[in-house]
Image: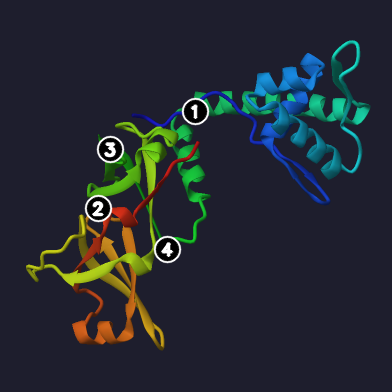
Amino acid sequence: MTAKTGEFIAPLAFETTTGEISPRRLALLSAIARTGSISGAARATGMTYKAAWDAVDAMNNLAGELLVTSQHGGKGGGGAELTPAGHRLAGDLVRMQTLQAAFLAKIREQGDLEKSMALMRRLTIKSSARNMLSGRVESLREGGVNSEVSVRLHGGECLHAIVTNESAMDLELVAGREVHALIKASWIILAPVDDGLRTSARNRLCGRVIRLTEGEVNAEVVIELAGGQNIAAVITRQSLQDMGIGVGDTLCALIKASHIILGVTS
């Protein structure tokens, strides 16, 4: 499956002195201008009626001035409309969407720039997990409650993760889907390549130690996998000394499938 730029969805937010108005709320704003009602705008944007009202209240509060005025009930069933400030914002949103759509069209004409855009998007991901490995779903085996997802990393190694069936559905995990595997460094157990140890850990990724960082209590060991991706493990300093780990050694990272968190970019 080749990464595609896809259709333009404005990644825009309205920054105010007290917070940010999300792209979904901006879409609601435009929908109110089109439909003239909160209920119609809610249906158009896939929100519940209550969520739409909550969003309108939040936008008016965050903007510091009314963007939407509304009338509850009444003979005509109530309605909503944008204030002049709301109309200006909705109009500017449309103009920015048009400009960005034209920009993306130019990028598509350049061909390989689409790949770089997909890469840049991955580089912006932030997480408290020390390790973020990228790959594509190779297979998915569904059970009664959980599913086992096999991910082929970009370096060639295979990683197995256990997620709930609900999570697999929410993330739309299918063969070929680009995913990111998040693994906390403290969840990784290190073992020599030829120890013959049998464990319950589903994953065994082996490579060469390229960097060590020692602290007073713990140490971080960074291993370069055969495919080129790096994985970091945090172990006690005593374990580092007992195992005699040094730069250049070959080690395996043992990871339980249930300790892998999968994420996708929407």
Judged left or right of residue 240, residue 75 is right
Whole-number angstrom distance, CA of label 3 to CA of label 4 = 31 Å
Judged left or right of residue 27, residue 233 is left
Query: Does residue 90 sit above or below 234 in this rendering?
Result: above
Secondary element at image label 4? loop
Residue 68, quarter of the rendered image: top right
Q: Tell me the crowding category of disc 2: few under 14, some 14 to 19, or many 20 or more residues within 10 angstroms, Cα based.
A: few
Q: Which residue is mark 3?
A: 144
Spot occupied by residue 185 in the image (x, y as percentages of width and height): 37, 66
Q: Tell me the crowding category of disc 3: few under 14, some 14 to 19, or many 20 or more residues within 10 angstroms, Cα based.
A: few
Spot occupied by residue 30 in the image (x, y as percentages of width and height): 76, 23
Q: Tell me the crowding category of disc 1: few under 14, some 14 to 19, or many 20 or more residues within 10 angstroms, Cα based.
A: few
Foreground: disc 3 or disc 4 = 3
Whole-number angstrom distance, CA of label 3 to CA of label 1 = 46 Å
Q: Which residue is mark 2?
A: 227
Whole-number angstrom distance, CA of label 4 to CA of label 2 = 19 Å
The reply to whether callout 4 and callout 1 are in contact (CB within 8 Å) is no
Disc nearer the start of the sequence (4/2): 4
At label 2, the amino acid type is Gly
The answer to whether residue 213 is seen in the rendering is no
Disc nearer the start of the sequence (3/1): 1
Foreground: disc 3 or disc 2 = 3
At label 1, the amino acid type is Gln
Q: Which residue is mark 4?
A: 130
Tell me the residue at 51%/43% (across/down): 121
Q: Which residue is mark 1?
A: 110
Whole-number angstrom distance, CA of label 2 to CA of label 1 = 29 Å
At label 4, the amino acid type is Arg
Tell me the residue at 75%/35% (across/down): 55
Tell me the residue at 33%/57% (across/down): 259
At label 3, the amino acid type is Gly
